[in-house]
Image (spheres, rainbow, N blue to C red):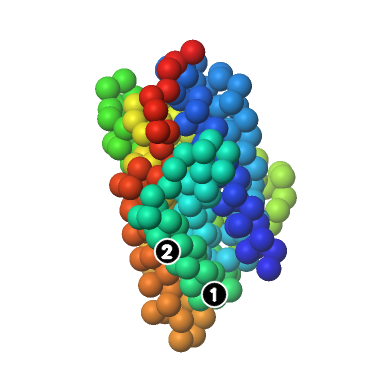
């Protein structure tokens, strides 16, 4: 229950963060986005959400945590409707219900978190992914489109999630974490992901960018968690788990394509 509560807290915080960061990205450009007060509020929510996800990963499989966190797009849509008075059409309402149902199925089907340690080559895989993401970030930051930037940001956040999952079986000792290269990879992946996601929001709308982000973040780390790290579902719940993941991913894409959570009028930069 602690892991589940932490994942729900992370979902809520990520939803708030997306709204705040999108607001800031429409009112500043380049590095100025990262200094905008509202963006800093969103970044603080992101940090708290990330800490919550680390707590969740100590008791829940990676695919369950990532699927639950993907529900933050539905949170973003609801908050936009309640706080910013952004209209949500029928497709957006149905998709939001689908995402919620999918997340319920995923959380119900999740088995206990695996105590299996990551194989030795997994660290090398993470190092290669970090190098590739960093190179892609350098290539795309200046001229990349919103979706491409969001996709690479998603790989950065996926790398952070997988590195954090690899650390889940390690003792919570500050001295050990400071000398563990995987712990530093979590930080490096997270920084690259945050910078590229902010750039993606500057270049395009929050819906498609966030949908791209979460679809990749559910499929890539979740799949590797099952195939490599020994994550499992409860006996007899494989089909509900797959249905739940499919509902969450499809609902997220529909939310983005329906324009839910988007401002109904152009925003003018400050």
Q: Residue at x 61, y 21 (%)?
A: 37
**Residue 239, x across and y down, in percent:** 39, 79
Q: Residues within 10 Å of mark 1 (few under 14, many from 20)?
A: some
The image quadrant of residue 2 is bottom right
Up the image or down, 41 lies above or below 86; here it is: above
Please tell me the numbered disc located at residue 17.
Answer: none
Horizontal side, residue 179 vs residue 121: left or right: right
Circle 1: element type: helix
Mark 1 or mark 2, earlier in chain:
2
Circle 2: element type: helix
Residue 83 is at least partly visible in this image: yes
Instruction: Check the picture and name the quadrant holding the N terminus.
Output: bottom right
Q: Residue at x 30, y 37 (%)?
A: 147
Up the image or down, 236 lies above or below 189; here it is: below
Horizontal side, residue 4 vs residue 123: left or right: right
**Residue 125, x across and y down, in percent:** 38, 50
Circle 2 is placed at which residue position? Answer: 98
Q: Residue at x 42, y 33 (%)?
A: 263
Up the image or down, 253 lies above or below 268; here it is: below
Q: CA distance from mark 1 to mark 2?
A: 15 Å
**Residue 48, x across and y down, in percent:** 65, 42
**Residue 108, x across and y down, in percent:** 54, 74
- Between label 1 and label 2, give the one nearer the viewer: 2
Q: Residue furthest top?
A: 270
Please tell me the numbered disc located at residue 108.
Answer: 1
Q: Residues within 10 Å of mark 2 (few under 14, many from 20)?
A: many
Q: Nearer the viewer, residue 156 or 12?
A: 12
Q: Disc 1 vs disc 2: Cβ atoms closer than 8 Å?
A: no
């Amino acid at each position: 229950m602690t892991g589940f509560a932490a994942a729900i807290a992370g979902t809520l915080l990520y939803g708030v963060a997306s709204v705040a960061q999108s607001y800031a990205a429409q009112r500043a450009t380049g590095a100025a986005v990262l200094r905008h007060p509202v963006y800093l509020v969103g970044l603080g929510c992101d940090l708290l959400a990330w800490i919550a996800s680390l707590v969740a990963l100590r008791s829940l499989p990676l695919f369950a945590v990532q699927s639950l966190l993907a529900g933050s797009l539905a949170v973003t849509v609801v908050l936009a409707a309640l706080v910013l008075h952004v209209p949500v059409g029928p497709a957006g309402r149905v998709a939001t219900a689908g995402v919620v149902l999918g997340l319920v199925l995923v959380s119900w089907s999740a088995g206990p978190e695996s105590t299996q340690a990551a194989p030795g080559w997994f660290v090398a895989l993470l190092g290669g992914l970090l190098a590739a993401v960093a190179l892609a970030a350098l290539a795309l930051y200046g001229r990349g489109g919103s979706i491409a930037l969001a996709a690479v940001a998603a790989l950065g956040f996926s790398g952070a999630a997988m590195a954090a999952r690899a650390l889940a079986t390690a003792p919570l000792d500050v001295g050990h974490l400071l000398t563990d290269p995987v712990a530093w990879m979590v930080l490096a992946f997270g920084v690259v992901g945050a910078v590229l996601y902010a750039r993606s929001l500057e270049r395009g709308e929050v819906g498609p960018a966030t949908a791209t982000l979460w679809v990749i973040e559910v499929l890539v780390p979740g799949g590797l968690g099952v195939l490599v790290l020994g994550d499992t579902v409860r006996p007899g719940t494989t089909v509900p788990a797959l249905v739940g993941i499919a509902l969450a991913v499809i609902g997220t894409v529909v939310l983005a394509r329906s324009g839910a959570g988007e401002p109904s009028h152009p925003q003018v930069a400050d």
